[in-house]
Image (cartoon, helix red, strand yellow):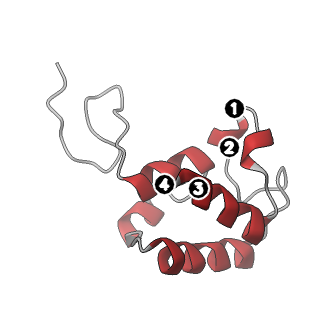
Amino acid sequence: MEEKLKELIYKTLNIDIDSMTDEEKDYPLLSKRFGVLPYQMLVFFTRLEKEMGVVISDEAIGAGKFNAYNSIRRLVFGENELSETGYELNGENTDKK
């Protein structure tokens, strides 16, 4: 399924995820670094929801989670990354001790 995400990014944004460094995978796709324009991200967003059957919430977009490859991958596959405060990036308390 991750290969499908990478393929969709390549077809829509012309970015080869496999050739990216780990640092680049955390860098915003909508940037001069990758040459992606806002309308391309919108097309990608629409195709992602339609072709992969996922729904990206307005809250996730507002929180900047539909941004870099790694953050988009976490949204698509339901992975949560813990922040240093013990909260998941989606804002739910994880009671990290």
At label 3, which amino acid type do we have? Asn
- The kind of residue on which mark 2 rests is Tyr
Q: Are marks 1 and 2 in contact (CB under 8 Å)?
A: yes
Q: Position of residue 46 (x, y in %)?
A: 56, 80
Numbered circle sitting on residue 23: 1
In the structure shown, which secondary structural element does the residue marked by tag 4 occupy? loop
The kind of residue on which mark 1 rests is Glu
**Which of the 4 image quadrants contains residue 35?**
bottom right
Q: Can you say which quadrant of the picture contains the C terminus? A: top left
Q: Is residue 61 left or right of residue 59?
A: right
In three-dimensional space, the C-alpha distance between marks 3 and 4, rounded to whole angstroms, equals: 5 Å
From mark 2 to mark 3, how far is it between C-alphas?
8 Å
For the residues marked 1 and 2, what is the alpha-carbon distance in whole angstroms? 7 Å
Where residue 67 is drawn, which disc sits there?
A: 3
Label 2 Cα crowd, 10 Å radius (few <14 / some 14-19 / many 20+): some
The answer to which of 74 and 38 lies nearer the viewer is 74
**Secondary structure type for disc 1:** loop
Per the image, the residue denoted by label 2 is: 27
Label at residue 65? 4
The first of marks 3 and 1 along the sequence is 1
